[in-house]
Image (cartoon, coloured by chain):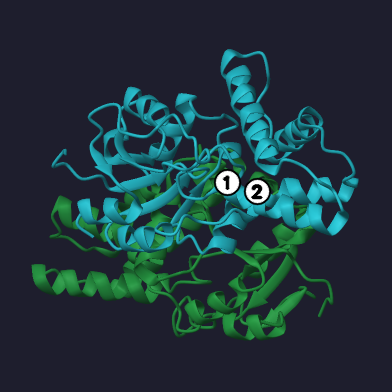
Chain colours: A green, B cyan
């Protein structure tokens, strides 16, 4: 592990800090029960997230423009429901399900780990979510951010360099003084490409019980930890 | 008082949430004592702030470009020291004095009031300070912001509309769903011009014992309060 320490640590949120899949499946199941709508909710959540990754690739390739994640999520939700064959939700139900991203629950170690890290480092989100989504998420899950960086501040999604470098610029720091912390090796590879420090931690069930990726650090990241509490220990807090 | 309630409340910070004058005078006095440098510290603080207001007018008039407040503050500090006739500080002393803006202390009611408001509203800063300054200030003074809006996010200072409207845009709200809270009637007049709600509270000693402005609400602001705790009461928190 690198002996150098960052000044600020910015966190990927979806999957890394909050459990998108478990939270969305639980909310859809509950609302489906109320409305008498049945569905394979894990399949809907996975299709939704798959659509998101495809959409990011399109934006990166330049075949789709940047848009507010709330709006893109809604378009992708309709598609996911259709693909999995769920019918029967009303328009306001779908609107509410889409806002489920604002209500994602934190992984059990997240609040305690961030609270410890915050005593010594600036801690912030660096997410493809829009600012409002991240603010609502932080309020609901008690995430103690010092600062929220959302993609609508840069009109760019990760992995565009404006996002990683924009967080450093707004903190008046050199990129090498900022650490991206994420459960995703690909996210960290991009952050390293633009000069940020890198911190990896494990979320082995983010994608469900049969997760096949991000089960280990795939490079010599500056910090490699089991979870955010362990990262706090490894960063002396 | 208006019966309509905002969704988010964004706060002017210098003077409204933190006591810039008292904090800077105390820090300069302490460092002056250590270095054997004497000066009329209240006069330096007032000249510094006066330079800032003149600088804002120049930016508004278009005769000066937007710049990071940390950098502008440093230029204005040198000028204030010269004008008041203080000599003897070293370069690193002046750098440290300039960073005093990152360490401003909160008014006694601020943390308690913001903590109450945060239970029901999104609370954020909307300041001409840069993001890093505001983040450091919040960490030092325990300000419980949900979100930090600094002028470097918009590359504009208040009263440019991009600042007031930018905070609403990033919160995905209509301007009328956001309240600017400030101890400065002029700030509120601008916010109202761009469609925001307005909340006034008193800081009768912000400019020292002989303060002559902002000693009362000068318009029918949506909320008029004694301080931030009183504002929390008037907004049912």
Q: Which mark is residue B104?
A: none
Q: Residue shown at 28%/72% (left/top)? A: A41
Residues behind callouts 1 and 2 on a single chain: yes
Tell whether B173 sits left or right of B211: left
Where's residue A121, x and y in %?
66, 68
**In this view, A34 is above or below B83:** below
Circle 1 crowding by C-alpha within 10 Å: few under 14, some 14–19, many from 20: many
Q: Which mark is residue B24?
A: 2
Element marked by disc 1: helix
Where's residue A237, x and y in %?
66, 82
Where's residue B46, x and y in %?
63, 35
Element marked by disc 2: helix
Q: Which mark is residue B20?
A: 1
Foreground residue, A78 or A95?
A: A95
- Kindly identify which chain the residue marked by label 1 belongs to: B
Q: Residue shown at 37%/30% (left/top)? A: B185
CB within 8 Å, label 1 to label 2: yes
Foreground residue, A175 or A71?
A: A175
Tell whether A79 sits left or right of A126: left
- Kindly identify which chain the residue marked by label 2 belongs to: B
Tell whether A107 sits left or right of B89: left
How far apart are labels 1 and 2 at the CA level?
6 Å
């Amino acid at each position: 592990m690198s002996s150098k320490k960052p000044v600020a640590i910015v966190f990927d949120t979806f999957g890394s800090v909050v459990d998108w899949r478990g939270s969305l499946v639980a909310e859809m199941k509950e609302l489906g029960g109320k409305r008498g709508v049945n569905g394979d909710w894990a399949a809907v959540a996975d299709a939704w997230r798959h659509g998101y990754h495809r959409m990011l690739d399109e934006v990166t390739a330049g075949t789709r423009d940047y848009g507010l994640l709330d709006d893109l999520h809604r378009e992708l939700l309709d598609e996911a429901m259709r693909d999995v064959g769920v019918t029967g939700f009303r328009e306001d139900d779908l609107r509410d399900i889409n806002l489920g991203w604002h209500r994602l629950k934190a992984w059990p170690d997240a609040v305690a780990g961030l609270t410890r890290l915050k005593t010594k480092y600036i801690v912030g989100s660096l997410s493809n979510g829009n600012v409002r989504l991240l603010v609502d998420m932080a309020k609901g899950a008690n995430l103690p951010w010092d600062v929220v960086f959302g993609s609508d501040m840069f009109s760019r999604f990760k992995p565009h360099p404006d996002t990683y470098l924009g967080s450093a610029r707004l903190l008046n720091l050199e990129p090498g003084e900022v650490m991206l912390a994420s459960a995703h090796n690909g996210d960290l590879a991009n952050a390293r490409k633009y000069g940020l420090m890198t911190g990896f931690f494990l979320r082995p069930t983010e994608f469900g019980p049969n997760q096949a990726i991000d089960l280990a650090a795939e490079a010599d990241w500056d910090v490699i930890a089991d979870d955010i509490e362990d990262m706090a220990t490894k960063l002396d807090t």
